[in-house]
Image (cartoon, helix red, strand yellow):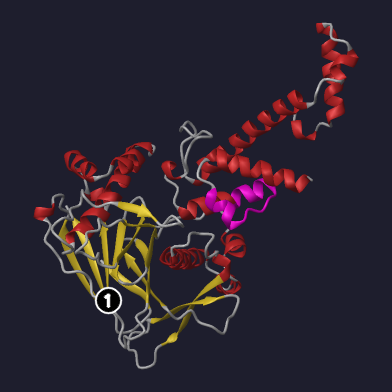
Amino acid sequence: MFSFLRQSTFTMKVHCFERKFCVSSSSLVPLPLPSRMETHFWYILPDEVKSSSLLNQYLDLLSPCEKENVFRMHGDRLKKRAILARALVRTTIARYQINSEVSPRSLKFRKNIHGKPEVEWQLDDDWRPPPLHFNISHTSSLIACGVTMDSLIGIDVEEKQRTIKNNILSFAQRYFSHHEVELLTSISDTEVQRQEFLKLWTLKEAYVKALGRGFSGAPFKTFTIRYGGAISGNVNSEASQIVVESCDDSTSHTSNWEFTLLELSSHYAAICTEKDNNAFEGGTLFLWNKII
Amino acid sequence: LNHRNIPLFSLIGLCVFSASAFSFSCEELLFYPAQPLSLSLSLSAKSETVEKVCTIVRKQLALPEDSAVTGESKFVALGADSLDTVEIVMALEEEFGISVEEESAQSITTVQDAADLIEKLVEKNGA
């Protein structure tokens, strides 16, 4: 169902679960909030949602603004995807044992000054909202939502078979860093080159989304994703460090960031989270496949 | 006939030629403010630019020829994700010989936004 392509830390544990996609809070099996060491990655496959009445129930969870956005989408497939993306975020966040007031429908969202979506908690005198972070990504065949506690998160998913319309090396020269262009140029097989391009794209996109400053806040050319050497003593030869470096100062590693790249249901999925510098071991990744 | 490439004086010449059929005097037309002429010029250029953007967008998103793509169309509503948007910007750069900075690229949400930005950058190049 999934496989690791690259992982930042060799001690990362992964747990895979399937959970039913539920609409009402009463049928949501509550989960404890993630610990600081955990990343929760929830995903659904839109093609598995076949019932239009179910889709209407999900639509009903959305805010008026979200519904407007849904109706602006061209065509049924895009409308369906928009409904499911918002429904996934709402039901996922509401599932955590936050408080009795929070339901998928009651959640409110806003965008930060750079346009990154975040929860707008309904503040109470006695209650402090949990530092829950989330990030969404979707393609036509997979919608994902990553959740962390007290740590910035950015995710990106892309279909493995996705074709690039522009010339890959021209694109990389225009947008990627020098080191990344060199890496791609060194690959002679065009199919492998396309795959490596996509992996780099998802990792870079996940990083920028984690930063939450938008595309122009961290232009792709200003940082490099680098695959470091294998960690000594690690049995799994696939696992090697993924690091991000600022191009301005190649000697400084922006070591606060943890990357994971996996293959999931014919997609590449990149997850970028803030590293807990107090942790000696890698975190735990929980993969939740929401099924209908 | 590319409006951009015709020097203004020869356009006025054309107008003078056709103006005689409407009994305008040559002097009157030559002293008419250039504004109405340039307004119609920029409107045509914009619709031509919009059309080119629509073509590039359709190709990037693999939309059928008859799909509704107009100036008002939002990229996101057409199904474009971030990689599509960047690919579209790159194709526009190549098509129009311009360079789009990240801040500008980020602000493009509709076909019209892209066309307006292209016009601005092409004009800057020409200046």
The residue segment tinted magenta is B90-107
Q: Main secondary structure of the magenta part?
A: helix
In this view, the residue in front, B113 or A179, is B113
Specify whether B17 is left or right of A292.
right
Q: Is residue B76 above or below residue A259?
A: above
**Image coords of residue B37 (percent x, y):** 76, 24
**Image coords of residue A184 (percent x, y):** 55, 70
For label 1, the residue is A36
Q: Residue furthest front?
A: A125
Of the 4 image quadrants, the one containing the C terminus of chain B is top right
**Image coords of residue A227 (percent x, y):** 47, 79
Q: Residue furthest left?
A: A26
Total marks in image = 1
Is residue A284 shown in magenta?
no
**What amino acid type should be assigned to the residue bearing mark 1?**
Arg
**Image coords of residue B2 (percent x, y):** 74, 32
In this view, the residue in front, A157 or A84, is A84
In this view, the residue in front, A146 or A96, is A96
Specify whether B120 is left or right of A164.
right
Specify whether A46 is left or right of B19.
left
Q: Is residue A202 above or below residue B54?
A: below
Q: Is residue A109 visible?
A: yes
